[in-house]
Image: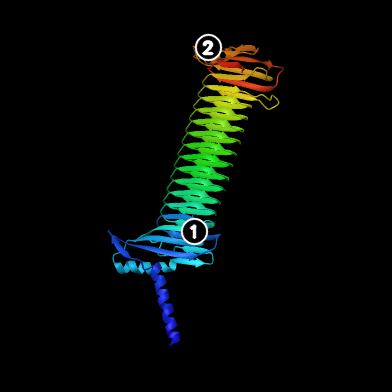
């Protein structure tokens, strides 16, 4: 009798526990049956939450308790209440605890006619691994690694002290205050980043990228948007196939490329490599050498403390060299095929200057103007005129050593003046 009574008590206890978790009130909202499921798991810090193959949104927050609390709002597109209760009963097997790991998801979460919204609270020191089939994911104030994937929603991460690996196929990504490495990718949205402590790799196939304050190296790619970068402590690499690039305040080298926009650079702490196929390049305060090119715009560089290699097929070039340590490499090679070329160099810079203008314009005259004494010559192009009588083609050259000679400054323009000016400060 005592044994049978004890079995009855245990059975009643199990029923109570189950009902407190799974037998919540079931309601009809329009065409859907809706129920709320809650469950609590005892865990230790350093565990892991895994949510996989579910449809719906997931929100992760933290607290000081050694518990994982799950609140799930389940929406079922079924015909009868009996079917809905069967789904709820089957959901029991989709909540699992294996030691310090909590797993949610399975057969009755991946189906098209079930959608869930999860609100989960975990210990502050925890890891999360979430893979969902079409909703948003947010994680905040977590001390642990984060691995996320969604097929059609946004990702928001805030105050993450762990490595981040996040991917969405159709939404935006936002990461604010992350201390370790970040790898993120979206196939159709914008990326916004702020206060990133570790190495960063971010890619989007159809949106803009904005980064503010990163302490380490960064690598950003977008196939269809602009890139804005401010305050970076490491090396910068950025590439876009269809937008503008702006970089402000970096301590390391910068490499940026765009196939269809302007490039604006200010206060660059190292070397610069910048190219665009369809816009202007502007730079100010560059503490290293510069390599830049554009196929259809102007190049305007101010306060460059190093050598410069610049080419444009359809614009003007203006470069200001402010190098003070003349022992550093200060070689200059500037070429424009359709504009004016102006260079400012320190008055006492030791260099060898070679400047040339090729003139194919039938009516206009061009010249080389220099604040330094140079020797000038002119090639009238008699032979070329005899073959092409409808065009006048000639060239003007000026060359010479200044301050005893040194690194080569080579300047070339087609149908445009060249101005060589002393920098006086």
Within 10 Å of disc 1 (Cα), the crowding (few <14, some 14-19, many 20+) is many
Residue labelled with disc 1:
122
| As drawn, 337 above or below 179 | above
Q: Which disc number belongs to residue 404?
A: none
- Badge 2 element: loop
Q: CA distance from mark 2 to mark 1?
A: 76 Å
Residue 358 picture location, percent across and down:
56, 17
Q: Is residue 278 left or right of residue 23?
A: right
Specify which label sits upstream in the sequence, 2 or 1.
1
Are circles 2 and 1 on residues that touch, CB within 8 Å? no
| As drawn, 147 above or below 367 | below
Residue labelled with disc 2:
365
Residue 252 picture location, percent across and down:
61, 36
Viewer-proximal residue among 416 and 227:
227
Q: Is residue 140 left or right of residue 232?
A: left
* Quarter of the picture holding the C terminus: top right
Residue 135 picture location, percent across and down:
41, 53
């Amino acid at each position: 009798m005592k044994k049978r009574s004890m079995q009855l008590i245990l059975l009643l206890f199990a029923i109570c526990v189950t009902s407190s978790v799974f037998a919540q009130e079931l309601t009809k909202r329009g065409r859907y049956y809706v129920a709320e499921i809650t469950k609590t798991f005892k865990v230790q810090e350093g565990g892991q939450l895994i949510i996989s193959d579910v449809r719906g949104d997931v929100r992760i927050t933290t607290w000081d308790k050694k518990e994982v609390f799950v609140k799930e709002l389940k929406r079922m597109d079924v015909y009868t209440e009996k079917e809905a209760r069967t789904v709820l009963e089957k959901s029991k097997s989709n909540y699992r605890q294996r030691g310090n790991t909590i797993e949610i998801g399975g057969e009755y979460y991946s189906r098209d006619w079930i959608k869930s919204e999860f609100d989960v609270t975990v210990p502050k020191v925890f890891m999360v691994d979430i893979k969902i089939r079409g909703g948003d994911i947010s994680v905040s104030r977590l001390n642990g690694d984060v691995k996320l994937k969604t097929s059609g929603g946004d990702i928001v991460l805030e105050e993450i002290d762990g490595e981040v690996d996040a991917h969405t196929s159709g939404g935006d990504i936002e990461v604010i205050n992350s201390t370790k490495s970040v790898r993120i990718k979206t196939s159709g949205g914008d990326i916004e980043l702020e206060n990133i402590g570790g190495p960063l790799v971010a890619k989007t196939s159809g949106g803009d990228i904005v980064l503010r304050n990163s302490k380490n190296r960064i690598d950003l790619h977008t196939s269809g948007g602009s890139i804005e970068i401010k305050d970076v402590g490491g090396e910068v690499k950025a590439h876009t196939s269809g937008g503008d690039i702006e970089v402000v305040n970096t301590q390391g080298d910068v490499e940026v490329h765009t196939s269809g926009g302007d490039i604006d650079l200010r206060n660059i702490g190292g070397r610069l490599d910048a190219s665009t196929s369809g816009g202007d390049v502007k730079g100010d305060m560059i503490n290293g050498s510069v390599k830049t090119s554009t196929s259809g715009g102007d190049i305007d560089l101010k306060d460059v403390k190093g050598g410069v290699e610049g080419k444009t097929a359809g614009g003007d070039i203006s470069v200001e060299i402010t190098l003070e340590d003349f022992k550093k490499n200060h070689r200059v090679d500037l070429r424009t095929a359709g504009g004016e070329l102006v260079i400012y160099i320190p008055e006492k810079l030791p260099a060898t200057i070679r400047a040339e203008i090729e003139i194919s314009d039938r009516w206009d005259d061009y010249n080389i103007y220099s604040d330094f004494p140079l020797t000038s010559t002119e090639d009238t192009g008699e032979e070329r005129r005899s073959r092409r009588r409808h065009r006048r083609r000639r060239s003007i050259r000026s060359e010479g050593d200044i301050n005893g000679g040194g690194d080569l400054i080579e300047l070339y323009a087609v149908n445009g003046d060249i101005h060589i000016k002393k920098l006086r400060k």
